[in-house]
Image: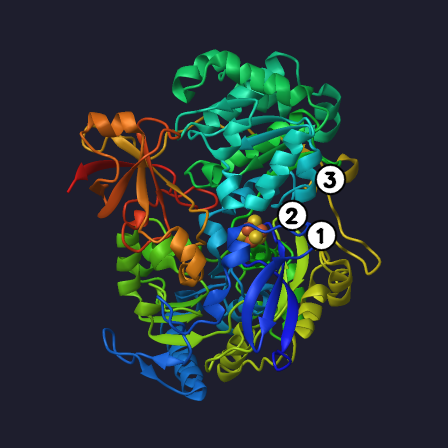
Amino acid sequence: NLDVVKSKVVTVCPYCGAGCKINLCVENGKIVRAEGANGVTNQGELCLKGYFGWDFLNDTKLLTPRLNEPMIRREKGGKFEVVSWDEAISYTAQRLKEIKQKYGAKSIMHTGSSRGTGNETNYVMQKFARAVTGNNNVDCCARVCHGPSVAGLQQTLGNGAMSNSITDIENSKCLLVFGYNCADSHPIVARRVIKAKEKGAKIIVCDPRKIETARIADQHLQMNNGTNMALVNAFAHVLIEENLYDKNYVANFTEGFEEYRQIVADYSPEAVEKLVGVPAEDIRQAMRTYAAAPSATIMWGMGVTQFGQAVDVVKGLSGLALLTGNLGRPDVGVGPVRGQNNVQGACDMGVLPNEFPGYQSVTNPEIRAKFAKAWGINADDMDPNVGYRITEVPHLALEGKVKAYYIMGEDPLQTEADLGLVRKGFDALEFVVVQDIFMTKTAEQADVILPATSWGEHGGIFSCADRGFQRFGKAIEPKGNVKRDWEIISLLATEMGYPMHYNSNEEIWDELRELCPLYYGATYEKIGEMGHVQWPCPTLDHPGTPYLYKDNHFDTPTGKGQLFATAWRAPAEIPDEEFPLVLCTVREVGHYSCRSMTGNCAALQTLADEPGFVQMHPEDAQRMGICDQQILWVESRRGKVISRCNYNERINKGAVYMTYQWWIGACNELTQDNLDPVSKTPETKYCAVRVEPI
Ligand code: SF4
């Protein structure tokens, strides 16, 4: 048909940190197909979310309504009223100014977004918080996922990111996969793990479940839930006791060995095998394999980070790499593989309460002066203190310290731990602004809704999990009365008395580059031409950095890797007679985050269209008289939800598993907000529950 106008737009998948490149095929303004493009990570392959995660962009009959007009709710509990953009912006600015005047700048909280909005928008949002509101209260969902990886790795190695590239995984000779179900979290990364196996790599999996990767592993240490720190300390114990560590490397490139050695001395495999649930000899064998490999990589996911002791475990895992010299060269290293597609980018852009873009500390007066000068504000007006984290907001709202919440592309009323607590916190807020693409659970509670363009309707830059900047393209025109996220923030800033005007993404990116030595050389053109530029990229002729810590120089204050060990602490809520099972939250391969995007894609919805199951080991279930597929109550000390039993022999006895994407059977009604003391990440991988037939 000659009348059909066709185009093919290269973009980057919005569904995980693997950063796969996609060709979106467009006909007459509608997307008709997605094809794998030749990205560095995916080399033409995609997983099902990449292939089928776009049709919400075409469809107007969605399960969750798309937001397509600005709306105001003038009274709590009242109805939303569609208004013009002028009115929405002026009303929002007025309310925020009043709250700032009445309660002070600290009373306003902001989020950036780790989703499809892009790095430029996150830069503008943190600038809004710091230059317009005047605080560092800006955060993102890294707080509930890989915040501990950022905090832990910054202390041990100097950078809170993957040390090496995703492409290195397949050439590593040993993969230690710890609390990371890559088949469900990052299927294209899982392909690299399979390729490594095909090339002869040894694979060690540490996980309470028999996850997909365990099926091809040389060793699967099916540990007890909540014992990560004990197992990591036992690993370190074996490396030292059996002289498997690299003494020259430790002497020349690390600090803290003596204290570290003393702490892990108490963690012989024999001493912890009962606690961890893994035979001592298996623990020893795992470290013999890891230490003997000419190159070894440690990968982890939320099975490490969503615990109250997560930062310590991250430090412990990086200690194993330091002990064996598995850093500073290709095909080795540490890999916290970031979950949401741009959570690395949100952190890179300073959507963190303690750091400006480029991981520059907000407590450093020289750094504050640099940003103040560039932004045309007085350095003395900048907040010199670390701001609030999103997980602290419910408590701070109940204490009356946070009064207004400007939320962009996040859904805390679905995705945060202990939703009962989060709801109480929201009820205590005076003013909530939600800037999003769907009527999420959080948007339903907003006072103002600012509708934004979606991935597919705008372009920009994402950071994938291995520090790689990639440009993504605009495929279609937006349909509603929506605006780009950074345009909305700029209008609001201007209305609040701080003129902010940008004409393009590139203009924002150039402003950012000038302020961030880590990214200065990563120009828009270079990212376009090379396709994938990994920071640090300090100069215009720099090609980017595929692996960090070359020449074993670490980005710590002394230039040396820091060894830390910490005693194991039990999770906060241990099962007892009343609540005898551990609940662990897990991921659903076909759905993403709060499911607002993937839940509105027909193919993905068809694959998983029922509110999440509760996975139970058949022996546990039968002992309780529960049949497969039976409808149950799942109850914790915080709440009670309906779910359906799913017999699953691949999970460990004594624990049940639920995915977190669903509104009915929402497992975050049950989870608890025991926070890691450093990163403030909640312990969503462990709480006590009971199950009962309805
Ligand atoms: Fe998208 Fe991740 Fe799947 Fe790649 S692996 S297609 S980035 S969801």
Q: In the rendered image, is residue 82 in sight?
A: yes
Q: Residue at x 68, y 26 (%)?
A: 200
- Is residue 165 visible in the rendered image? The answer is no
Q: Give the mark nearer the N terminus: 1 vs 2.
A: 2
Give the image location of residue 370, x and y in percent: 67, 65
Q: Which residue position holds label 2?
A: 466
Residue at numbered disc 3:
549
Q: Ligand 1 near label 1 (Cβ, under 8 Å)?
A: no
In the shown orientation, is residue 433 left or right of residue 326? left
- The amino acid type found where label 2 is placed reads Asp
Asked if the residue under mark 2 is in contact with the one under mark 1, i.e. CB atoms within 8 Å, the reply is yes
Q: Position of residue 637 (x, y in %)?
A: 22, 42
| Residue 534 tag number | 1
**Which residue, as the protein is rendered here, is positioned at the far right?**
541
Name the kind of residue labelled 1 in the image: Gln
Q: CA distance from mark 3 to mark 1?
A: 14 Å
- Check disc 3 and give the amino acid type: Tyr
Quarter of the image with the N terminus is: bottom right
Q: Residue at x 43, y 76 (%)?
A: 450
Q: Earlier in the sequence, mark 3 or mark 1?
A: 1
Q: Residue at x 72, y 19 (%)?
A: 247
Q: Give me the C-alpha separation between circle 3 and circle 2.
A: 14 Å
Q: Judging from the image, what secondary structure is the residue with disc 1 in?
A: strand
Looking at the rendered structure, the secondary structure element under dot 3 is: loop
